[in-house]
């Protein structure tokens, strides 16, 4: 037998072994081989059906442009795993990932009380929402500001797992914001410092338009204090009760407070409220929603009274 015939025989034997292995992996014992190709064909069909659910040109979609932020758009073209879309109604175009889109009209498969969803509140305005109650034709939903809406199922989209996590964090932040604002309403004016008197020439923080601003006392006239705002030429007359000493405050005074005002980056800005976690002779540990917990010098902290104290 020549080398050519031997190679041909080996090639045919290898091919037969490969085919036999494929059949053994795909077919249960006793089944007809024809069913193998039918089953494989069904798997291909399933993949085709799955891919066919992806948005196509001309479809309307809901796009999650960033975490828990949404806009409605129309698909202009398709490119593998991404789409070119045109926002409604602005007309702006962008490329987005297919995984970041939802087909419209909405199909809500998991509407249940306390579940999170994406809701169409007004025309193309889509926001994160929480299901308060399920109704015959839809649901009663609440937005992050706890406003309530009655919506049909067509205006409620069930989120995927990643969007659901984004919505959960969105509602957690909104809850934290309400709690923080509630705590701030409990705060009173800056604490009194024993022996301190507002006299011309002293640097103070003054309450104007319900905010506190760094100022200097220019003069005292007719029972009021004339102040000049730091960083500006603005001059205003205020009551004695509307000024407080510029920090630092004595440590024993600051340690009685749970809420404080903190010095802003610019002298011309209003002082911002924070939670006062702890304070020592040099530093204070404070917390707010924008920057979380951090330490600041005590000269930047103005402790506030609370109504119960």
Image (tube, rainbow, N blue to C red):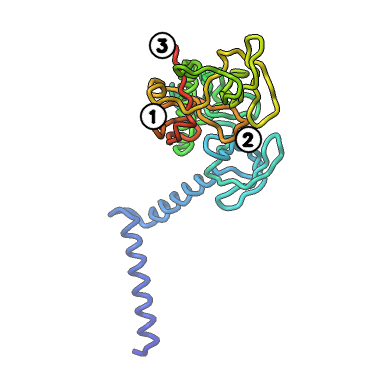
Say which of marks 2 and 3 sits in front.
3
Which quadrant: the C terminus? top left
Q: Is residue 208 left or right of residue 177?
A: right
Other residues around mark 2 within 10 Å, as few (<14) / some (14–19) / many (≥20): many
Q: From mark 3 to mark 1, how far is it between C-alphas?
A: 20 Å
**Direction top: furthest residue:** 222
Tell me, for residue 294, which label it has, or none: none
| Cβ atoms under marks 2 and 1 closer than 8 Å | no
Q: Is residue 135 left or right of residue 10?
A: right
Which quadrant: the N terminus? bottom left
Residue behind mark 1: 279
* Residue 86 drawn at (x, y percent): 68, 41
Identify the residue at horizontal 36%, vertical 57% (top origin).
33
* Residue 252 drawn at (x, y percent): 38, 23
Residue behind mark 2: 72
* Helix, strand or loop under label 2: strand
Q: Give the mark nearest the N terminus, 3 or 1.
A: 1
Q: Give the mark nearest the N terminus, 2 or 1.
A: 2
Q: Is residue 44 left or right of residue 207?
A: left
Residue behind mark 3: 308
């Amino acid at each position: 037998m020549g080398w050519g015939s031997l190679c041909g025989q080996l090639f045919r034997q290898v091919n037969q072994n490969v085919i036999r292995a494929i059949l053994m992996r795909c077919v249960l014992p006793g089944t007809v081989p024809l069913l193998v190709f039918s089953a494989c064909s069904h798997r291909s069909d399933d993949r085709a059906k799955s891919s066919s659910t992806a948005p196509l040109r001309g479809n309307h979609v809901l796009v999650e442009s960033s975490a828990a932020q949404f806009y409605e758009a129309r698909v202009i073209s398709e490119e593998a795993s991404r789409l070119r879309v045109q926002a409604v109604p602005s007309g702006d175009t962008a490329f987005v990932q297919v995984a970041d889109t939802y087909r419209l009209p909405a199909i809500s498969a998991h509407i249940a009380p306390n579940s999170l969803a994406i809701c169409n509140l007004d025309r193309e305005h889509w926001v994160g929402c929480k299901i308060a109650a399920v109704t015959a034709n839809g649901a009663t939903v609440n937005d992050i500001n706890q406003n309530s809406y009655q919506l049909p199922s067509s205006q409620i989209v069930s989120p995927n797992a990643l969007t659901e996590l984004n919505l959960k964090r969105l509602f957690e932040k909104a809850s934290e914001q309400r709690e923080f604002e509630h705590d701030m309403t409990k705060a009173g004016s800056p604490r009194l410092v024993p022996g301190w008197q507002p006299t011309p020439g002293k640097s103070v923080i003054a309450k104007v338009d319900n905010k506190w601003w760094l100022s200097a006392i220019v003069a005292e006239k007719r029972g009021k204090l004339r102040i000049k705002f730091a960083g500006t030429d603005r001059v205003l007359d205020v009551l004695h009760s509307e000024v407080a000493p510029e920090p630092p405050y004595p440590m024993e005074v600051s340690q009685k407070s749970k809420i404080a005002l903190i010095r802003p980056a610019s002298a011309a800005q209003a002082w911002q409220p924070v939670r006062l976690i702890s304070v020592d002779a040099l530093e204070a540990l404070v917390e707010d929603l924008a920057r979380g917990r951090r330490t600041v010098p005590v000269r930047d902290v103005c402790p506030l009274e609370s109504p119960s104290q």
